Image: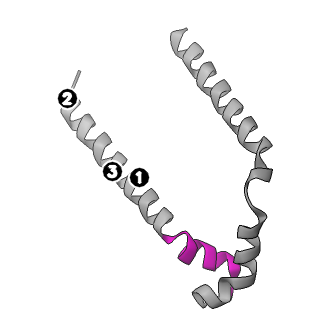
Amino acid sequence: MRQAVLTAFVLLLMVFVLFIANGHREILPNEISTYYVHNFTGDTGALNAVAAIYLNYRMYDTIFEALILITSIIGMLHFFKAGGNK
């Protein structure tokens, strides 16, 4: 019962955060997207805007996401080994 309440609370919190984030789209400046559309070829040399954004503009973001994923996997493997047969 306690786990169900916690799960429901987390789901409601996620819905609330997404609802708030979705309502504030106008805060993000439109100039950023306009800059990407007009300057991706000169900045990156890519012919495709999607490839330019993923491979050049967001390169560090992608590298750090992969680093966090690998760190969490290593941590979970460590805790599984440390837990033993309980």
Q: Amino acid at mark 2?
A: Gly
- Residue at image position (38%, 58%) is 67
Count of numbered circles in the view: 3
Q: Which residue is mark 2?
A: 84
Tell me residue 5's x, y (percent): 59, 13
Looking at the image, residue 37 sits to the left or right of residue 75; the answer is right
Label 1 or label 2, whichever lies nearer to me, is 1
Q: Is residue 33 above or below residue 22?
A: below
Between discs 1 and 2, the one toward the N terminus: 1
Q: Secondary structure at mark 1?
A: helix
Q: Secondary structure at mark 3?
A: helix
Mark 2, other Cα within 10 Å: few <14 / some 14–19 / many ≥20 = few
Q: Tell me whether the residue at label 3 lies in contact with that at label 1, contact meaning CB atoms closer than 8 angstroms.
A: yes
Tell me residue 27's x, y (percent): 75, 51
- Residue at image position (70%, 30%) is 16
Q: Amino acid at mark 3?
A: Thr
Q: Tell me whether the residue at label 1 lies in contact with that at label 2, contact meaning CB atoms closer than 8 angstroms.
A: no
Q: Is residue 80 above or below residue 42?
A: above
Q: Amino acid at mark 1?
A: Leu
Query: For this rendering, which residue is in front, 66 or 38?
Result: 38
Looking at the image, residue 19 sits to the left or right of residue 9; the answer is right
- Residue at image position (21%, 25%) is 85
